[in-house]
Amino acid sequence: MADPLSTDEITQQLEDLPGWEHRDDKVSKEFTFENFRDAMGFITRISYEAEEQVHHPEIFNVYNTVNISLSTHDAGGKVTEKDMMLAKTIESLYNN
């Protein structure tokens, strides 16, 4: 079972993740793309990384916008190191 991070730990790690927010026991970000195809390609790339990390995000898509939220079920729906690692991976996919 993963241990939840403190608010201070989350805030510190979010300094390296521009645009990510911590609220409602999740870290979240909205990503915008040129079109639907690019948004869906991003979601597909995330799916491979999520499977590798055995950690799956909440994903919401409308046309060219993708909203990602992360929390850890095994930690009572709180934010853990697993969430921060996946957020960093997602951020690197978006910036490539």
Image (spheres, rainbow, N blue to C red):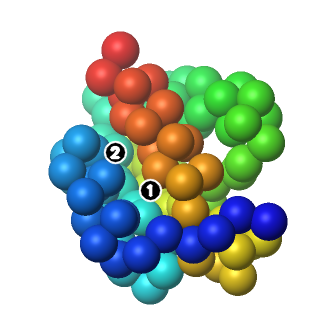
Q: Amino acid at mark 2?
A: Phe
Farthest top residue in view? 96
Question: Nearest the camera: 60 or 16?
Answer: 16
Image point (31%, 23%), residue name: 95
Seen in the picture, residue 59 relative to 90 is either above or below; the reply is: below
Marking on residue 31: 2
* 50 shown above or below 95: below
The front one of 42 and 4 is: 4
Residue at image x 51%, y 62%?
69
Query: Does the residue at mark 2 contact the one at mark 1 (Cβ under 8 Å)?
Result: yes
Residue 60 visible in rendering: no
Q: Is residue 82 left or right of residue 95?
A: right
Q: Tag 1: Cα neighbours inside 10 Å, few (<14), some, or many (≥20)?
A: some
Q: Could you tell me which residue is drawn at 60 percent across and 33 percent down? A: 46
Residue 91 visible in rendering: yes
The amino acid sitting under disc 1 is Asn
- Look at the image and tell me in which quarter the C terminus lies: top left
Residue 64 image point, x, y percent: 39, 42
Q: Is residue 74 left or right of residue 3?
A: right
Q: Left or right of 68: which side holds 64?
A: left
- Residue 31, compared with residue 11, is above or below; it is above
Q: Which mark is residue 67?
A: 1
List x then y, in percent, for residue 57.
63, 54
Q: Picture quarter containing residue 12?
A: bottom left
